[in-house]
Image (cartoon, rainbow, N blue to C red):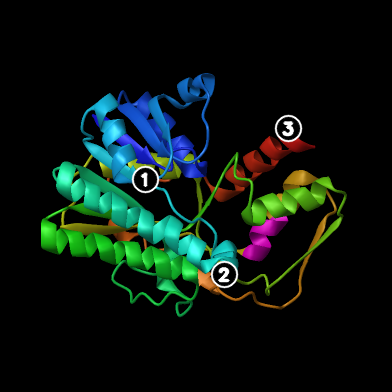
Amino acid sequence: MTIWVTGANGFIGRYLARSLADAGHAVSGVGHGAIGEPDKQNLGMRHWLNGEIEAANLHALAARTGMPTVVFHLAGGSSVGLSIIQPYEDFSRTVATTARLLDWLRTTAPGCRLVVVSSAAVYGAAYEGPISESAATQPVSPYGEHKLMIENLCRSYATTFGLRSTIVRLFSVYGANLRKQLLWDLCVRLRDGARSLTLGGTGRERRDWTEVRDVARLLAYVGSNSPVQPVDILNGGSGVATTVADIAQTVADSWDEGISVAFSGSVRTGDPFSLVADPARLNALPFEWNIPYDAGVAEYVAWFKEQFR
């Protein structure tokens, strides 16, 4: 298949491009950032276009690759915190970019399959147990609102123009090369000599952690199958709830013995208490998560020490 990955130079995008290339597909990408020829070959990408996702650039990429069979849309904002600091920037990166892509597909490649990466942030902060795809969406941050907007854009283009898509709502994705968020912040503090870690919140907050290599496999699987509905929605989570206290202690124990973890009790705006998937739909597929969080976190710490200690 001829496959495009928007945001292929991002954290998940780079793993996805490599996974798709290893499966024998012709993979090309578009998004921001220079990728040199050796890096492009390591990622398995035949073509990389450094630029905005807009009609002129998409036409240029099609001239090199032919029309895409599948487009994986990963480009967009990737941080709740940054969306609060710069909400319009997050809107532009997420919503406007998606609107331009959908309109190009509508007019130029309407038969292309589309896989859109969304986020569990669309569910908001009202849930304490596993969340199913049919749960009400009540985002509490600009990031979550903008992800919900792109889902609604997909629905609009399906209803009006027949453009079919699969939306995968990812939960807490981590793995080597992730240079932000909780695991990165903890490792930076430990590298700088901290022997005790104090975090915001209570520590009882629950998250559904999935390793990026598993996530890339899931997205590749979804892209190889046509959506059941005009817009199909799938939770990209394992259903395994892990407290923030447990994940922080796993990082500390993987780093060294005797490191303590404590919590301030203060809760940051936009942080739900619990975001854990109901994995029933995913479990009905021939797909399994291979990497348990404790092993994956230990690998992350080992990667960080090798690269930055």
Res. 287 in view: no
Drawn side of residue 131 relative to residue 243, left or right: left
| Residue 282 is a magenta residue | no
What type is the residue that disc 2 sits on? Ile
Q: In 3D space, how far apart are the residues under numbered discs 1 and 2 (Cα atoms)? A: 23 Å
Q: In this view of the protein, which residue sits in the foreground, 308 or 296?
A: 308
Q: Residues within 10 Å of mark 3 (few under 14, many from 20)?
A: few
Query: Residue at image x 30%, y 32%?
Result: 60
Q: Nearer the viewer, mark 2 or mark 3?
A: 2
- Measured as percent of width and height from the top left, residue 18 is found at 43, 30
Q: In 3D space, how far apart are the residues under numbered discs 3 and 1 (Cα atoms)? A: 35 Å
Q: In 3D space, how far apart are the residues under numbered discs 2 and 3 (Cα atoms)? A: 33 Å
Magenta segment main secondary structure? helix
Which residue matches tag 3?
306
Q: Residues within 10 Å of mark 2 (few under 14, many from 20)?
A: some
**Residue stretch in magenta:** 244-249
Which residue matches tag 2?
84
Which residue matches tag 1?
53
In which quadrant of the rendered view does residue 277 lie?
Answer: bottom left
In which quadrant of the rendered view does residue 94 lie?
Answer: bottom left
Instruction: Determine the secondary structure under disc 2.
Output: helix
Query: Residue at image x 34%, y 29%?
Result: 27
Res. 187 in view: yes
Instruction: Determine the secondary structure under disc 3.
Output: helix
